[in-house]
Every structure is written in structure tokens, then in C-alpha cells.
Image (spheres, rainbow, N blue to C red):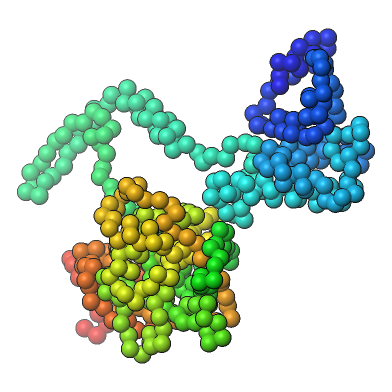
Amino acid sequence: MLDPLEVHLLDFPNIVIKGSELQLPFQACMKMEKFGDLILRATQPQMVLFNLYDDWLKSISSYTAFSRLILLLRGLHVNNEKAKIILRPDKSTITEAHFVWPTLTDDEWIKVEVALKDLILADFGKRNSVNIASLTNSEIRDIILGQEIAAPSIQRQQMAELEKSTEAQSQVTAVQTQTTNVHGDTLQVVTTSNYEQQVFSSKSDWRVRAISATHLPLRLQHIYVSNDDVKDDAGSFTYVIPKNILRAFVTSSDLRTQVGAFLYGTSPPDNKQVKEIKAVVWVPQRGNNNNVELPSALPKEDYLLKDLEPLGWIKTQALDLPHLTPTDVSTQAKIMAEHSEWGPNSICVVTSFTPGSISLSAHSLTVAGFEWGRKNTDNGPNPPGFNPNMSERVQLLLSDRILGMTLVPEGKVWNYGIGLTQMWNSNIPYSIVLDTPLTFWAEQHRPASFLTFANLEGGEESADVENSFA
């Protein structure tokens, strides 16, 4: 763009042109019929001057005209066909011979601008697997203008820290440290580098994560159910999850470590194609950032689960993906293979913690996914033979008209991932009762955190308390 303009402006030395960091799609203009016909009919090189603002400046400011032009160009660049349909709201819309864009009223232009903005954001969300509703205004502006949206580079931060540390180490300072070992011997050590002078400290950030988990109920104000690309055939089911058991599940979860639970429900008498989830059964489990280990035995309860059929399981994860992960496919396939009561319509409801919100989606396994998952032994992120098409989305609805119940293991302890890891066993026996689940960071799940306080109370360092009855 700059070179031909500078050539044409040689006669105007007072005009200076500078490049912009904005990636403005001016080449989208070539997709308009007016310019395309002009190029096709051209028989010789010629310079043509067009006013891309038409007569907009008669009724709007130059800032609004520039914003409208950016929306038009970006919309044509993202989806040419849909943008052209948006630009012609009805058959009576015409384009004047001396204008580039269709002649519309101010109200019609407002509707066109909103539609183009939605088109651009929808394309961005689909390409990057981002929930559009969770974008901030500044991010939306950057997307429309074409600026790159990227988090601060961790690598750049580490490089800066390394540079600082090398500068500090260039000034060598000897430090003499005197310590006493367990035998009472006095030791003197001379150190010259920062590495030798560092004191060991644990990197566990469980306190920060426990505080962050208390904000999970706030995310329940923004729940998005994703039903894009849902299979629609005569044999497919529609699953309905009550809002009260979803609230209990999310409140007891963690933002980073995955948790899971089994789903039980039934069909209403008047519609067998609908499955209403009636119970979420918490079972003993051990999770990490990539998967969750569930016990091999399914929950048994003669009264609470009477007349309810197993529908699948529900789990959390930090990323919103359009398909099930390889570990989830393997987990569900192995449960279906080991327990005949889990039929081919068993689902996995994925609860994704997107920024400031929660995204829900339900998936069932294909035949290929079941066969691959039950034989898979690779728990890595990219196992051989995996295909994203091994799972397909099913219809999921969120309702507050029906209510469900939560069942927990007897004793209420279900999280064996933070403080009870050594007690975990996939064959652990358990029985379930009707109760509210403990939170992920509850005291019963991390007893080691309180042993220090117990030792202080009973040891020699305990505080002197006056005995009034002595």
C-alpha cells in the first residue's frame, strides 16, 4: 500500500505517510463487484481515485465513518458471502453509480454494523475456540482492528529475570554463614553465588488456589450451554440437567484439578427421547490437571438409585474444547466395557471454566471411539490413533424447573488428590448417602495441613494458659 502512494505523492512534499501496526484488510475491497468489474474491463494502466466514505460524512463524524469502514472491510475479509448478504437487507437496496457501498439510512447502517461485528466475533471464536461472551470490550476492539491478542510472554519474563540475575552475579560477594547441625556442631560456610544462598521453600500454591475456588459460585451467573454441531437423528436423546445439582457440583470443584461424578436419571413418562438427570453421585477419586481417576466399582444403593438408570458422568476441565480429550475417551470407554449397564448412549458432560463463566457441553462416544478407548494404554496428551471425531456432541439443556439430588460417599470424603493420595486405590470400597458434598479444599481432604497446629498445642511451645480451677 505504501510504495504506490508515495510515488503518487511526490508532487506533495508536505504530506507524510507512515505505516500502521493495524492489519487493515484493504485487499477486501477487491471483492466488491464495482472494483472487480473495473479491473476486468481495464485495457491499460490507469490511476483511479475512489472515496471509500461515499457521502457518510454528511450525517456522521469521521471517527464513526472510519469505524464503519473497518467493520465493512473486516467483514468482507472474514466471510465475503455473508457480508454481502448483510450489506443488502432487502431487494430495494441499491448502490449509486458514483458510490462504492450500498445506499442505506442511518438506522439501517446501525443494524448492518451490529451484524458485521457479530460475524467477525463469531469467526474469531470458532477459529480460536473462544467463548465470545467472555471477551472484554478492549479485546473486541482489538479483534475488529486486527491487532494480535496475546498474553504477556512468559519466555520474555524469564529472559528478563535471567538478565537481572547475571547482572547480580557479576558482582561477586562472599557471604559467611554460621549454622549448627543436629549434633550441636558449629559449621561455617562461605558462599559466593545467589544460588548457594537461597533457602529452600515449597512451591505449593494451595492457599491461593483454595481462595480462588471460593469464587466459583460467582461464575454460575454466566453459564453457556454449547449445542453447536449436535447430531440430529431419530435415535438421539436430549439430556436435561437441573440447575441445583450443577450449582452443587461447580461449588465443590477446583479451577485447575479435574473432578468427576456419575450421573443417574430417567425419562419422563410422556417422552422417551428425553433423559432428565436426577442425581449426581460423588465417588472417591484422585484428579490432576489432565485427568481424573475414578473407582472401578459403580455406586450401589437399593433405595436412592431405585428406578434410575446410569446416564454417564460429569467432569470439569480448564479449557473449552470442541471434543473429548483422549483421556476422557479412554475413561468412558473402559467404564462402558467393564459395566454393561452403561449403554452406547452414555454421555460425558464437560464443565469448562472459561474466563468469568462456565461452558457446558455433552458428548457421546462413536463406535470407533469406544473401540480405541477400551484398548488404549497411553495416558499422554497425544496418544497414537486418536481422532477428535471419536466423540460427538449431544443435545444438552439446563433447567431450573426440575430438581436433582447429590449423593456422596459415607463419611463425605471424596477427594484423595491433595492430602490423602497414599490412601487412594481404584478398588476402594465405598457406600453412598444423601448429603451435600464437601468442597475440594475442605479440612477433611487435607488433614496434614492441620497436624502442625495440633503438635503446637500439645508440645512444649504451647502458650501458657492460666487454669482458673487450679
Q: How many marks?
A: 0
User: Whole-percent x and y of residue 188?
Assistant: 14, 36
Could you say which is closer to the camera, residue 80 or residue 125? 80
Any part of residue 361 in sight: no
Q: Is residue 322 above or below residue 351?
A: above
Left or right position of 243 against 177? right
The quarter holding residue 228 reads bottom right
Q: Is residue 307 above or below residue 277?
A: below
Left or right position of 366 against 146? left
Left or right position of 268 against 33? left
User: Whole-percent x and y of residue 142?
Assistant: 64, 40
Could you say which is closer to the camera, residue 411 or residue 198? 411
User: Whole-percent x and y of residue 393?
Assistant: 50, 62
User: Whole-percent x and y of residue 350?
Assistant: 46, 63
The quarter holding residue 35 reads top right
The residue shown at (54%, 71%) is 234
The residue shown at (30%, 65%) is 334
Left or right position of 254 against 300? right
The quarter holding residue 415 reads bottom left
Q: Is residue 367 above or below residue 431?
A: above
Location of the N terminus by quadrant is: top right
Any part of residue 434 in sight: yes
Location of the C terminus by quadrant is: bottom left
The residue shown at (31%, 75%) is 340
The residue shown at (82%, 32%) is 34
Could you say which is closer to the camera, residue 246 or residue 460? 246
